[in-house]
Structure formats: C-alpha cells, structure tokens
Amino acid sequence: MEQKKQERIINEAMKEFARSGYDRASTNEIIKEANIAKGSLFVYFNNKKELYLFLLDYISEAVSKIYDEVDWTETDILKRIWDVGLIKLKFYKKYPQAFDFLKAASHENASEVKSEIDKMSKANFEIAFKRFYKDTDLAKFSDDIDIETAISVINWTMTGFAQQQADRLNSSDEISMDVLGEWQKYLAFLKQCFYKKEEK
C-alpha cells in the first residue's frame, strides 16, 4: 500500500478505536474518514479484530523503536527524557493518534481482544521501564525527594509538553528553535525542583 494512504488508514483507525472503544468502533467510519473505497479495508484485514490487533502490534513496535535512538550512555535521567521527548515529538507528527490509542487500549475490556492486549502491554511496559531507568544516576536527586514521585512528575510534564507541541505542528513542519528553547526551560525548572543544588 502507498505510504501516505497506509498512514491515513492507521491514524483514522486508531482515532476511531480510541474514541469509541473496540465494541462500538465502526469500520464504516474508518473507511469514510480515511477516504478509501468501501470494502477496500478488508482487502488487507479479514475483520475488525484483525485490524485492531494489527494496530496494537504496529504501534507498540513503532513506540519501542523510539528507545533505539536514545543515547543510553547518558546517565542523567533529565537528559534521557529530553532525548526521548524529542523523538516522541517527531513520532507524534507522523501518528498523532498513537498514544491516545494505546491509552484507550490499556483500559479496553472487550473480551475479544482483552487477553492479547494484556499480554502485549505487560511485556512492552516491563521492557521499556527496565531499559529506560537502567544505569541512571539517581544520586542527582535531592535527599528529601521521593524519587519515584519526582520521575512521574517529570514524565507527565514532558509527555504533556510533547503532545501539546505536536498538536500545533503539521506533519511537514520542522521543530522550531522556539519549541526547543521552551523545552529547555521546562527541563531547567524540573532540575531546580528535584536535583541537588550544584556547588559553585
């Protein structure tokens, strides 16, 4: 399938599943929004379940590749998050519905797909978590800080910022110096909040 057409179908399918849930999602709505011929979706997928599981596998694999681009020799967790955030921002531009779809999938209870979701989500989460935090220098955090809570706040802040910026960008836009400068301000603020003060 032509690349742009493939991306359009993937994004519209993820949007419909995220918005409606598995049981209520309409393949007719996906076909309409993706602007493809009626019935052509099932040239590639036999049924809705096959489409859903394809999306889950495709996007999970694509997200996991984000981590292949990170500099794992960097032990400062804020700098790692900076790297991951920039890569995620580029990913958002290509698949703006991806993280909404994965979030919805994590709460999906439809019996037809529940077992596959649980199996895939658990494996991907454990691999990503172990890899991301491996060999990070947690001694940089202030002694009176709950490190687990601090890391959650850092992740929420940077993920939210990346999604906000991605919503403003078209797929062809470059990431501007203004965006990078604003991102640096957030990182500096988080560092000030959670890290030990540097000796002068």
Image (tube, rainbow, N blue to C red):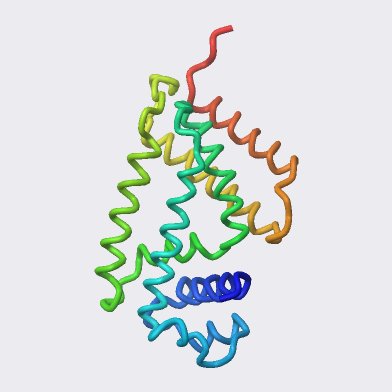
Q: Position of residue 25 (x, y in %)?
A: 44, 82
Q: Position of residue 185 (x, y in %)?
A: 65, 33
- Furthest residue toward bottom: 38
User: Quadrant of the rendered structure where residue 172 is?
Assistant: bottom right
Q: What residue do we see at 56% from left, 62% from top?
A: 95
Q: Which quarter of the figure is the C terminus placed in?
A: top right
Vertical order, 99 against 84 (above or below): below
Q: What residue do we see at 57% from left, 70% from top?
A: 7
Q: Is residue 130 left or right of residue 177?
A: left
Number of on-image labels: 0
Q: What residue do we see at 39% from left, 25% from top?
A: 138
Vertical order, 173 against 22 (above or below): above
Q: Position of residue 170 (x, y in %)?
A: 71, 61
Q: Position of residue 9 (x, y in %)?
A: 55, 76
Q: Which quarter of the figure is the N terminus placed in?
A: bottom right
- Furthest residue toward front: 1
Vertical order, 50 against 165 (above or below): below
Q: Is residue 142 left or right of residue 38?
A: left
Vertical order, 14 against 146 (above or below): below
